[in-house]
């Protein structure tokens, strides 16, 4: 299929695309600046704004006392204060909001705000939270088979601890919202959010006004990656609070330094494991425990934990398994959604275990992976869903072939014998990622499609464009279904007054859900057009009867399939519909069928389908500097029938590099009292062009449409390829394990950063 160009590529390249902060200033617009907490845990005792208010140009300074109705927010549990009222729970927590004529004045005034705090002892690490029993909610469990029996049958049992670090989203566009007050209670908000409807609800609840007074709009986001799924609402709330109190538009845009300070990250985890396996490496029993660092408030931590647990076995059938998960409260910013939504941590843990098994048995880890894959006889997941339409073995064979795995592996063995200070490693990683929101209700979407009398089409839907290409995919679907040129289809800003009650664009479901909703709306319009046009054709000439189902929409024409001379251009047909008084607009709706999960029994069918992939990555490690270089990556990915192969390739490459940043480069460092130290790119290392492998070969699995009905038989793409980023970490671990002769290897953490690698090498050399 031909790939449409990214719909706003030209405007973006020319610098003419409007991101939220590019909207020209509104009449009498003010700016807001957040004063944040200088301690991770404490109490706000008193505050005094008098000196700050004397500065010319300061319009208002707001505290929790100025919030008219609901003072807290959250996704399901409203436990996060919009502004601190009493207890401070993280370093960087918003306490007050300064509203001024410009940012400079607001910033100057902020320095004059006085307050008194009482400091309390912070809890920063998971270990500390466990010691204090600060769990966010009761632990969750998934179980299948009988692990005790499984361990009895095992030839080998290994146990261990695995530390996984967090990750900063580093979207290029930091959080931003503009609130514009309207007549009476009306409030319009332009914001960079993945979830406009949630912003709408929360703003209405904070102000004590009905939902129909609040309109939220988002045209495009400069990246989100989950960081704007729940957390963008905080800035919409603060901007709206400012607008409410001043009666003037208020803009709030975070600087990078503040964005990194205030916002939550990917969850760090402490995992414990005990696994049993036979002499060939078949997994027989696994006892897995996940402890996540939730930060100060609930946010999305509980569904994130669920997704970790749903991915704890990745692509492997484990007959006897027990998975226990707990989220722990700490005095850090509330951690949140980040590409993969907990899945990457579950997958990294089991992949680490597979390498340990391979070291115990002196086998190639890829062999251990392959013999444990789900197959037709072994297809039941720990939560009872069958792995259907399994593409793992097809992908494995193709990955072996495309990457020339065997040859590379033997060359690497030779290379490593010949080189003392430079070593190479090769790792394969399978992906099986569940597609659907883990909270089944959220799997729904709506659309509004309008056809104008010149034959052009305007598409609205509930999804957010954050760079992933959703709008382009929707444009492609509308053009194909109407049989018109893509240039005649425009997808416009997502807005709560066009499509109501939408869900976050997340869980990689944006195109699956909205694509079906757009399709549904188009079907309705086409049916009306077909009925009216058939009647019109038959009236014009009664020698042949056209029935509505005979009409074909193709190449900008609508014609009778059995009498193609009977035709009318799409534009003329649209004009004719006006004359014939036929409606040319429709709403569409979709919900994913047949998915559910029962946490009482730990069984269900939480995913509509699985996305599969197989990656092979080769790395080189310089033992003297600890520097890792990625040499080559072969990524074989299953996207069903792709909606847009070029966009999908972009998603695969981008997700892989972002994943590699998490496993090898990015390292959030906190002080003992909970202050994040690295808050800019000089100390927080995101991948740069030099970190990308010299060769990335992306192969889309062709000829395998999705077996279950999805839009044009495609598959979701946004998150699954993030997991490829775990492969270079596995390859590095292999190299280090070899230095230790595969015995008494230290705990190799994730991320394996340059400095940590040096310490592990140093220890090995000095043994
Ligand atoms: N790609 C870009 N360029 N920017 C983003 O913010 N977010 C990712 C992924 N790809 C993201 C991205 C995440 S976390 C998700 S869940 C999906 O896109 C969401 O979009 P989709 O459901 O339309 O794939
Ligand atoms: N993914 C992303 N966001 C979500 C999910 C999910 O599975 N569940 C609830 N919000
Ligand atoms: Mo993506 S983490 O589901 O926004």
Image: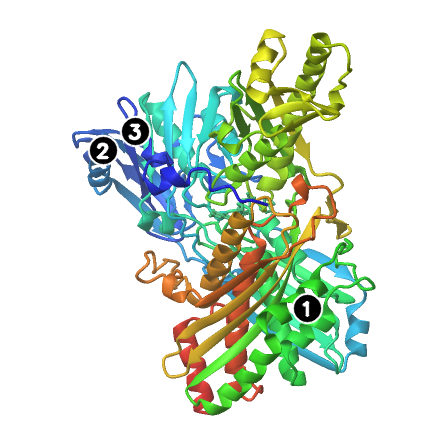
Q: Is residue 632 above or below residue 484?
A: below
**Residue 133 appears in the figure:** no
Kindly indicate whether the residue at mark 1 contacts the one at mark 3 (C-beta within 8 angstroms).
Answer: no
Q: Nearer the viewer, residue 109 or 758?
A: 758
Q: Residue 384's quadrant in the figure?
A: bottom right
Question: Separation of disc 2 and disc 3 at Cα?
Answer: 14 Å
* Quarter of the image that includes the N terminus: top right
| Residue that carries the numbered disc 2 in the rendered image | 102
- Say whether disc 3 or disc 1 marks the residue closer to the N-terminus: 3
3 or 1: mark nearer the eye: 1
Residue neighbourhood size for the residue with mark 1, other residues' Cα within 10 Å, grouped as few (<14), some (14–19), many (≥20): few
Secondary structure found at label 1: helix
Question: Separation of disc 3 and disc 1 at Cα?
Answer: 54 Å
Measuring from the top left, give residue 628's x and y in whole percent: 42, 74
Measuring from the top left, give residue 265's x and y in whole percent: 46, 53
Residue at figure coordinates x 31%, y 22% from the top left: 248
Q: Nearer the viewer, residue 8 or 686?
A: 8
| Residue that carries the numbered disc 1 in the rendered image | 397
**Residue 293 appears in the figure:** yes
Residue at figure coordinates x 67%, y 32% from the top left: 590
2 or 3: mark nearer the eye: 3
Residue at figure coordinates x 72%, y 10% from the top left: 541
Q: Which mark is residue 24?
A: 3
Kindly indicate whether the residue at mark 3 contacts the one at mark 2 (C-beta within 8 angstroms).
Answer: no
Measuring from the top left, give residue 262's x and y in whole percent: 39, 48
Whether label 3 lies within 8 Å of ligand 1 gets the answer: no
- Say whether disc 1 or disc 2 marks the residue closer to the N-terminus: 2
Q: Is residue 370 above or below residue 530?
A: below
Q: Is residue 685 left or right of residue 488?
A: left
Secondary structure found at label 3: loop
- Say whether disc 2 or disc 3 marks the residue closer to the N-terminus: 3
Residue neighbourhood size for the residue with mark 3, other residues' Cα within 10 Å, grouped as few (<14), some (14–19), many (≥20): few
């Amino acid at each position: 299929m031909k790939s449409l160009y990214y719909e706003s590529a030209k405007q973006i390249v020319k610098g003419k695309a409007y991101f939220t902060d590019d909207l020209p200033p509104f009449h009498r617009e003010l700016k807001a600046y957040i004063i944040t907490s200088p301690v991770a845990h404490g109490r706000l005792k008193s505050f005094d704004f008098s000196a700050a208010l004397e500065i010319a140009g300061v319009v208002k300074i707001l505290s929790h006392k100025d919030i008219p109705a609901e003072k807290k927010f959250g996704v399901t549990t409203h436990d996060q204060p919009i502004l601190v009222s009493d207890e401070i729970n993280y370093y960087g927590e918003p306490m007050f909001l300064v509203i001024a004529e410009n940012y400079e004045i607001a910033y100057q005034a902020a320095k004059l705000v006085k307050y008194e705090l009482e400091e309390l002892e912070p809890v920063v690490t998971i270990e500390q939270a466990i010691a204090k029993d600060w769990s966010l909610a009761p632990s969750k469990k998934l179980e299948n088979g009988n692990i005790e029996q499984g361990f009895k049958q095992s030839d080998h049992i290994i146990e261990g601890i695995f530390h996984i670090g967090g990750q900063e989203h580093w979207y290029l566009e930091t959080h931003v919202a503009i609130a514009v007050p309207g007549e009476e209670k009306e409030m319009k908000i332009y914001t960079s959010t993945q979830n406009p409807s949630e912003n709408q609800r929360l703003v209405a609840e904070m102000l004590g006004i009905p939902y129909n007074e609040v309109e939220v709009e988002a045209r495009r986001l400069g990246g989100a990656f989950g960081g704007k799924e729940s957390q963008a609402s905080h800035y919409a709330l603060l901007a709206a609070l400012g607008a409410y109190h001043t009666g003037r538009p208020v803009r709030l845009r975070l600087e990078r330094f503040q964005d990194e300070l205030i916002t939550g990250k990917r969850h760090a985890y402490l995992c414990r494991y005990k696994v049993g396996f036979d002499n060939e490496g078949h997994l027989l029993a696994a006892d897995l425990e996940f402890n996540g660092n939730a930060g100060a408030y609930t946010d999305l931590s509980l569904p994130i934990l669920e997704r970790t647990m749903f991915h704890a076995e990745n692509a492997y059938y484990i007959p006897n398994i027990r998975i226990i998960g707990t989220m722990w409260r700490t005095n850090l910013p509330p951690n949140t959604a980040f590409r993969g939504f907990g899945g990457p941590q579950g997958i990294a843990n089991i992949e680490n275990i597979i390498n340990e098994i391979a070291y115990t048995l002196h086998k190639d880890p890829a062999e251990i992976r392959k013999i444990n894959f789900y197959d037709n006889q072994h297809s039941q997941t720990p939560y009872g869903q069958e792995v259907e339409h399994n593409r793992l073995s097809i992908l494995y064979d193709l990955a072996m072939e495309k990457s020339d795995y065997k040859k590379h592996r033997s060359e690497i063995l030779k290379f490593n014998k010949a080189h003392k200070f430079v070593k190479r490693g090769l790792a394969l990683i399978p992906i099986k990622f569940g597609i659907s929101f883990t909270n089944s209700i959220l799997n729904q979407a709506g659309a509004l499609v309008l056809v104008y009398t010149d034959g052009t089409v305007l598409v609205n839907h509930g999804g957010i464009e954050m760079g992933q290409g959703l709008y382009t995919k929707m444009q492609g679907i509308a053009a194909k279904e109407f049989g018109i040129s893509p240039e005649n289809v425009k997808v416009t800003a997502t807005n709560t007054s066009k499509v109501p009650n939408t869900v976050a664009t997340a869980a990689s479901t944006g195109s699956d859900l909205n694509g079906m909703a757009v399709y549904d709306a188009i079907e309705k319009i086409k049916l009306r057009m077909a009925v009216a046009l058939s009647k019109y054709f038959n009236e014009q000439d009664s020698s042949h009867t056209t029935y509505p189902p005979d009409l074909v929409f193709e190449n900008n024409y609508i014609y009778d399939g059995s009498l193609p001379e009977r035709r009318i251009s799409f534009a003329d047909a649209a004009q004719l519909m006006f004359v014939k008084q036929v409606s040319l607009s429709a709403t569409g709706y979709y919900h994913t069928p047949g998915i559910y999960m029962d946490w009482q029994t730990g069984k269900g069918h939480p995913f509509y389908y699985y996305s599969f992939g197989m990656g092979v990555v080769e790395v080189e490690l310089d033992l003297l500097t600890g520097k890792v270089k990625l040499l080559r990556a072969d990524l074989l990915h299953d996207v069903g029938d792709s909606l847009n192969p070029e966009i999908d390739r972009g998603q695969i490459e981008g997700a892989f590099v972002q994943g590699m940043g998490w496993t090898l480069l990015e390292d959030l460092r906190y002080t003992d009292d909970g202050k994040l130290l690295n808050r800019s790119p000089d100390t927080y290392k995101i991948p740069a062009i030099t970190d990308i492998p010299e060769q990335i070969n992306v192969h889309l699995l062709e000829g395998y449409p999705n077996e279950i009905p999805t839009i044009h038989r495609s598959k979701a793409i946004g998150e699954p390829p993030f997991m490829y980023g775990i492969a270079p970490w596995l390859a590095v671990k292999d190299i280090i394990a070899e230095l230790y002769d595969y015995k008494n290897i230290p705990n190799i953490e994730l991320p394996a950063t340059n400095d940590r690698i040096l310490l592990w090498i140093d220890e090995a050399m000095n043994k």
